[in-house]
Amino acid sequence: MAEAEVRRRPGGRSARVRAAVLDAALELLAAHGLEGLKVADVAARAGVHETSIYRRWGTRENLLIDALLEATGALTVPDTGSLRDDLVAYATDLAAFLATPTGHALEHTLAAAGDDPAMREARDRYWAARAGGSMQIVVRAVERGELPDTVDPRLAIEMLVSPVHFRVLLTREPIEPGMPARLVDALLGGIAVSRPPSDPAR
Amino acid sequence: MAEAEVRRRPGGRSARVRAAVLDAALELLAAHGLEGLKVADVAARAGVHETSIYRRWGTRENLLIDALLEATGALTVPDTGSLRDDLVAYATDLAAFLATPTGHALEHTLAAAGDDPAMREARDRYWAARAGGSMQIVVRAVERGELPDTVDPRLAIEMLVSPVHFRVLLTREPIEPGMPARLVDALLGGIAVSRPPSDPAR
């Protein structure tokens, strides 16, 4: 595993150590959840000294967040030039990621995580980073004139991704292939006006 | 607790037993999660024989679903005659319920629950019952002509409730008082067209 990472992320020993530690952390997270993430175990699995981890990351929570961001870094933010296409692609990618064993495990890990101050701070940073990326879809659409500049990018992205998370975590319903597009059409056009021919509401 | 229930739900010994068992199940669920829900413990706490529970509910999962539906039965489906008011009220009530200790515990219990066949079947029944109630808001709006009859009531309700669940389970962000209304306005009018004055998108 560490070997594959080296090929993917060149950059010398420091980058190799980082990749090995993050891989080890993700494997332990996926297998045992957040409670199972002990720095000593991560160090042993990655073949590094525990002190190296603390020197680089400072805290267990910093390591956790870095590992989560590394895993969800696969979720690139699309930039096709079309708001609708970007949103459909993003929701589709998110659903696909959450259907992988790693994505599924991380999602449940985040839902089960406690609320102590260090964890809360780490979680806030994680979601801020996620939102900061995905909100660019909305920001760029405003710049292109596809959305009014009064739109709330944060709420828009929450409305896009939440139904996907809702199904994965709570109802466990499958996300059928056409769902992201139906979601995006309802989000962009609204349910009251988006479906011709007749629109008695407004 | 059982005494208060008796006052609320009159109906003789059978109703009293039912109320006592469901209360006991909810208390154990909130305190220990789904794994802690043992029929023997529920029986002991409710002061009834274990066999009485099996006679009435058949399985642990049936009992679980009945207890969850009892707890979320407090979530009445509003019928004000206005789609917007109904949706805002429903999202507001849901947020308030999920902020209670019971609501919070049940939400995390459902997110953490496993996927064995009995649990899956019980969960499907639970969410079908929840959706069946809340979708009436949309169905009635179609009948009143506030929505086109091509609207998908299930998707509409998913888009309404998911951002509330997303914050409670994942980001743990507070649901500010104005959030339900902003959510409903975006859902009804769409983000691309709902904010005057200028609408370059369509």
Image (spheres, coloured by chain):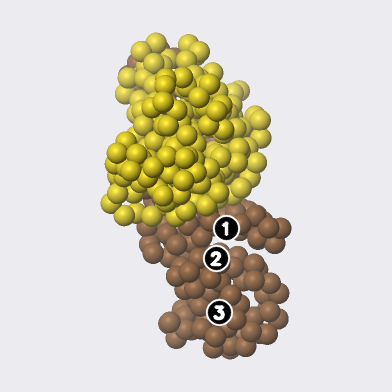
Chain colours: A brown, B yellow
Q: Are marks 1 and 2 in contact (CB under 8 Å)?
A: yes
Real-space Cα distance between discs 1 and 2? 7 Å
Looking at the image, residue B101 sits to the left or right of residue B153; the answer is right
Front residue (pair B52, B66):
B52
Q: Are marks 3 and 1 in contact (CB under 8 Å)?
A: no
Image vertical order of residue B179 relative to residue A164, above or below: above
Q: Position of residue A43 (x, y in %)?
A: 58, 83
Q: Residue at x 36, y 40 (%)?
A: B53
Real-space Cα distance between discs 3 and 2? 12 Å
Image vertical order of residue B91 relative to residue A179, above or below: above
Q: Specify the amino acid type for callout 3.
A: Val
- Residue A65 is marked as none
Q: Position of residue B158 (x, y in %)?
A: 43, 35
- Residue A42 is marked as 3
Real-space Cα distance between discs 3 and 1? 18 Å
Q: Specify the amino acid type for callout 1.
A: Ala
Q: Position of residue B61 (x, y in %)?
A: 35, 45
Q: Chain of mark 3?
A: A
Mark 3 crowd level (few <14, some 14–19, many ≥20, 10 Å Cα): many
Residue beneath disc 1: A113
